[in-house]
Amino acid sequence: MADVAIAPEAIRDTIAAALGAKALNVEVALGEVVLTVSPSDYHAAALILRDAPGCQFEQMIDLCGLDFSAYGDGRWEGPRFAAVLQLLSVSLNQRVRLRVFCADDEFPVLPTVTDVWNGANWYEREAFDLYGIMFEGHDDLRRILTDYGFIGHPFRKDFPLSGHVEMRYDAERQRVVYEPVSIEPREVTPRVIREENYGGLH
């Protein structure tokens, strides 16, 4: 492992050179390198990031889904769903955040990267379960956090906070039963607008 961390700008330039036209954007944001690729180049870009000299991101340490439908108070005009990966090069002591947006909001699909980083397996299942993002080529894409027969994807912004069904143990039937939700939907967090210089902070 490298003893000294490489400057983010140097990592950015190395990644941009390695990916060429496959990189839609490579930037340094808040001291971290953030890279965006298209869904059609996602798998090829993942292989380059893992294998290219100067990149060598041997580990994928996280993958999550995102729903941008309410991002920026509704001012977002790009695609709705994305997958974001955190990659680590142990040998070079560097990190990068890889972001890829799904081409179709109605049926979000991305290629799997389980053959690139096998640790992506359960993370992709989680993104499928919670956001409905399909990972084409995944060997076992099924729900991982929600219950059997669960309907919908609970981390989507349009999924109701109270859900669609509730479960309870029925003593007479001696089993768990599912019923329509009996509580009214409500706003649980009030919107707070801070005044400028709130609390004396500048």
Image: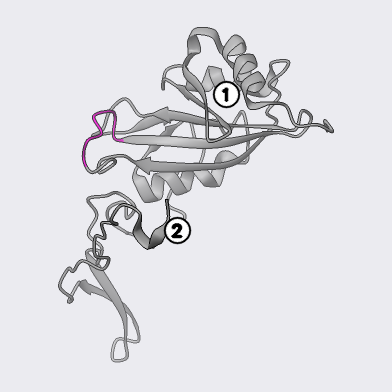
Under tag 2, what secondary structure?
loop
Type of residue at label 2? Leu
The number of numbered badges drawn on the structure is: 2
Q: Is residue 78 magenta?
A: yes
Is 14 left, or right, of 74 in this rendering? Answer: right
- Asked if one can make out residue 148 in the rendered structure from this viewpoint, the answer is no
Neighbourhood count class around disc 1 (C-alpha, 10 Å): few under 14, some 14–19, many 20 upward: some
* Mark 2 or 1, nearer chain start: 1
Residue furthest to the left: 184
Is 139 situated above or below 92? below
What predominant SS class does the magenta segment belong to? loop
Q: Which residue is mark 2?
A: 145
Indicate the position of residue 160 as horizontal and vertical percent values: 22, 59
Indicate the position of residue 159 as horizontal and vertical percent values: 24, 54
Q: Which residues are magenta?
A: 74-80
Residue 40 position by quadrant: top left
Indicate the position of residue 47 as horizontal and vertical percent values: 61, 20
Type of residue at label 1? Ala
Q: Residue at x 54, y 17 (%)?
A: 44
Residue 93 position by quadrant: top right
Is 107 situated above or below 47? below
- Coloring scheme used: one colour
Q: Residue at x 32, y 25 (%)?
A: 103
Is 101 situated above or below 187? above
**Marker disc for residue 143:** none
Q: Which residue is mark 1?
A: 46
